[in-house]
Image (cartoon, rainbow, N blue to C red):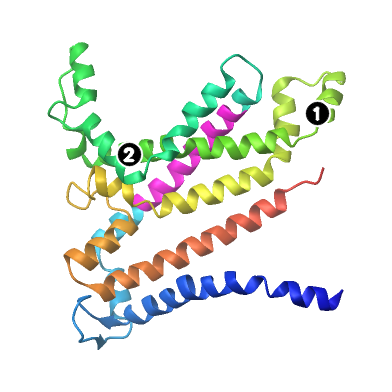
């Protein structure tokens, strides 16, 4: 058996090599660049130590991007999980058109985030925007939605949440269908209400699904990039930037590759620490059945 286990370990080697080549090596390169002053193109690189990190914590636009990243991460995760669970409960019941509802909810995931951003841009643009045309029918004057920092962040959050809510729905649906019906039958005999059954049976047994959904949605939302670029390009000004888009801005627009790398390293550790904290929290909440 020991020989067989040793042989099976060789199957890990391709995955390990991929991780080293496409994750570990680029991260080490990024960490090295973050300690330098470099324009991203030339051969001259000047070692400046932690100056990029010091400048980062003095940059008002960095804190604005970080605040927006938290808004996107927290709000998108909350919306995707609440509505994803609600939709999973809906499609888990039998009714006519069940399959159609699943397809319609899941369909936006098939559209690339950049394409979705451009599609929604034509809904929200001031001139001939579909939303403004609808409001005109009801006598409401059109607004330049994307020129407002508040509405820009709001619509990015709503669009991203709507696009990926189907992913949460599928994961919650799998969790619901994995719960033995015997628990609900026993609860019905004891006179347990629907809400009590949901609170004391469904939610505790859905912890693995909740953990998966929350962490994957949070990581995806904290790295939000494509919808922002195609919808607002971080504007107006820097008011809708996320950390991911601000990295691109500093690298290609400001030509500060070292500074962009420092933000990237910060983003990596922030997401890693937050994910580990959540993993440990949900691990304590998990129940066996």
**Are there few (<14), some (14-19), or many (20+) residues within 10 Å of tag 1?**
few
Does the magenta run of residues contain 85? yes
- Give the alpha-carbon distance from disc 1 to disc 2, as whole Å: 39 Å
Highlighted magenta segment, given as a residue range = 68-88
The residue carrying mark 1 is 181
Q: What residue is rendered at 37% in x and 36% in y? A: 158
Circle 1/circle 2 CB separation < 8 Å:
no
Q: Taken as a whole, is the magenta stretch helix, strand or loop?
A: helix
Query: Hey, which quadrant is residue 128 in on the image?
Result: top left
How many numbered marks appear? 2
Does the magenta run of residues contain 209? no
SS category of the residue bearing label 1: helix
Q: Residue 251 or 2: which is nearer the viewer?
A: 2
Query: Hey, which quadrant is residue 51 in on the image?
Result: bottom left
Q: Is residue 243 left or right of residue 61?
A: right
Give the mark nearest the N terminus, 1 or 2: 2
Q: Position of residue 194 (x, y in %)?
A: 72, 21
- In the rendered image of this protein, does residue 279 appear above or below residue 32? above
SS category of the residue bearing label 2: helix
- In the rendered image of this protein, does residue 264 appear above or below residue 180? below
Question: Which is closer to the viewer, label 1 or label 2?
Answer: 2
Q: Position of residue 35 (x, y in %)?
A: 32, 82
**Are there few (<14), some (14-19), or many (20+) residues within 10 Å of tag 2?**
many
Residue with the most extreme left position: 127
Q: Is residue 204 left or right of residue 3?
A: left
The residue carrying mark 2 is 116
């Amino acid at each position: 058996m020991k020989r067989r286990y040793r042989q099976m370990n060789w199957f890990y080697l391709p995955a390990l090599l991929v991780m080293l080549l496409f994750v570990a090596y680029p991260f080490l390169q990024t960490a090295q660049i973050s300690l330098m002053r470099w324009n991203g193109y030339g051969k001259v690189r000047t070692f400046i130590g932690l100056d990029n990190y010091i400048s980062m914590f003095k940059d008002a636009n960095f804190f604005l991007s970080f605040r927006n990243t938290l808004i996107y991460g927290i709000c998108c995760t909350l919306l995707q999980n609440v509505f994803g669970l609600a939709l999973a409960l809906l499609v888990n019941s039998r009714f006519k058109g069940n399959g159609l509802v699943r397809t319609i909810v899941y369909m936006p995931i098939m559209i690339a985030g950049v394409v979705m951003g451009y599609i929604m841009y034509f809904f929200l643009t001031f001139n001939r925007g579909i939303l403004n045309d609808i409001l005109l029918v009801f006598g409401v004057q059109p607004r330049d939605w994307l020129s407002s920092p508040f509405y820009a962040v709001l619509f990015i959050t709503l669009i991203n949440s709507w696009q990926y809510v189907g992913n949460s729905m599928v994961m919650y649906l799998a969790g619901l269908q994995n719960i033995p019906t015997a628990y609900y039958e026993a609860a019905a005999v004891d006179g347990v209400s629907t809400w009590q059954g949901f609170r004391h049976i469904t939610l505790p047994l859905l912890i693995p699904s909740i953990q998966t959904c929350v962490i994957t949605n949070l990581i995806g939302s904290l790295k939000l990039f494509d919808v922002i670029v195609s919808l607002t390009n971080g504007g107006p000004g820097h008011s809708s930037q996320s950390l991911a888009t601000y990295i691109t801005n500093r690298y290609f627009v400001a030509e500060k590759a070292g500074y962009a790398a420092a933000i990237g390293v910060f983003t990596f550790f922030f997401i890693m620490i937050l994910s580990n904290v959540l993993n440990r929290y949900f691990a304590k909440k998990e129940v066996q059945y």
